Image (tube, grey):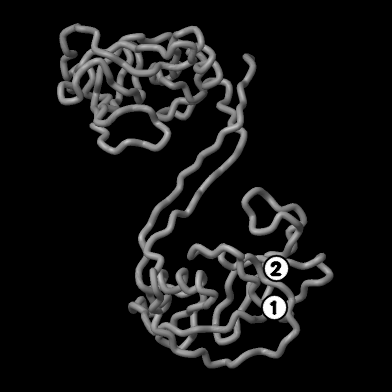
Amino acid sequence: MPDVLSAPLVVEFPFTRSLGPVQSAFLTGLRERTVIGVRADDGTVLVPPVEYDPVTANELGDLVEVAPTGTVTTWAWNPSPRRDQPLDTPFAWVLVRLDGAGTALLHVLDAPGPDAVRTGMRVRIRWAATRTGAITDIACFEPYESEPGPAEPAPHTGEFADPVTGITAPARLDYVHTPGRAQSAYIKALEERRTVGERCPSCRKVYVPPRGACPTCGVATAEQVEVGPRGTVTTFCIVNIKAKNLDIEVPYVYAHIALDGADLALHGRIAGIPYDQVRMGLRVEPVWSEGARHVDHYRPTGEPDADYDTYKELV
């Protein structure tokens, strides 16, 4: 069996979203060291607030201010903080029902050890020194000996100067990716500027990139088949939005390309031709990145377009 490759992989997507009046009031309130909740149809004060009642689905807007103190309803100890977690020392994950709220808020508790944490303990918010209108404006909770505050929260208009109207929520996943036997062979072939697939022993279709098993028949594949390098554009799209950290000017074309001898189209960028002249059936060939181990893009070969009947099953 050939050596199976592995490499660290990071998938990151910063999601940007706008805020409605309820979420805007909540996050702007945190910036101003004020905790805003919303009253549900049954009178329960929800913190964090939501825009629609979880039971009736009615729109909610009756905002109230709750206290920065509360009670731990449940907890779990985290002995080894990870990157970007609220604290870099061991801490407790806690659900805290703030005084005046009917639901609990998830955050962290700064405590010297698990023996110092218990359900029912009283805590208060420790505010971040710099606040921007995010849940991280609450740096953490800390133990605080006090009696429960008023059960009835005070009404709040939700109006603040310079309200927060949008947020960017980072999403990141770090892991070690192992492509497996079939795709390891595929990647190694790319180093030699070759493209290989695997043929199903049952239906005889050649899949590129290989998957190690036929997705149609469900049987293992092992017979390697070299395909291409030329192929046919089966379908495509025109990209008009420039991606961050991608040095490609828009508009450009991204296409499904059926390499000669393959029974599955793969993805590739089309260049060397005006974007509005790319078409189904266009014959293309790979252009390899200098010093890289992958195809940079595909360009027209100058051959006549392929007949639709030759690639219609791959559209």
Instruction: Find disc 1 in the rendering and name its residue.
Output: 123
**Residue neighbourhood size for the residue with mark 1, other residues' Cα within 10 Å, grouped as few (<14), some (14–19), many (≥20):** many
Q: Is residue 126 left or right of residue 311?
A: right
Q: Quadrant of the C terminus?
A: top left
Label 2 sits on a secondary structure element that is strand
Amino acid type of the residue tagged 1 in the rendering: Val
Q: Closer to the camera, 220 or 53?
A: 53
Asked if the residues shown at circle 1 and circle 2 are in contact, with their CB atoms under 8 angstroms apart, the answer is yes
Residue at 36% across, 9% down: 229
Residue 237 in sight from this viewpoint: no
The Cα–Cα distance between marks 1 and 2, rounded to whole angstroms, is: 8 Å
- Residue 314 point in image, percent of width and height: 27, 24
Identify whether 300 is placed above or below 71.
Answer: above
Label 1 sits on a secondary structure element that is strand
Amino acid type of the residue tagged 2 in the rendering: Leu
**Residue neighbourhood size for the residue with mark 2, other residues' Cα within 10 Å, grouped as few (<14), some (14–19), many (≥20):** many
- State which tag comes first along the sequence, 1 or 2: 2
- Quadrant position of residue 137: bottom right
- Quadrant position of residue 76: bottom right
Instruction: Find disc 2 in the rendering and name its residue.
Output: 109
Q: Is residue 31 left or right of residue 158?
A: right
Residue at 44% across, 54% down: 168
- Residue 115 point in image, percent of width and height: 84, 70
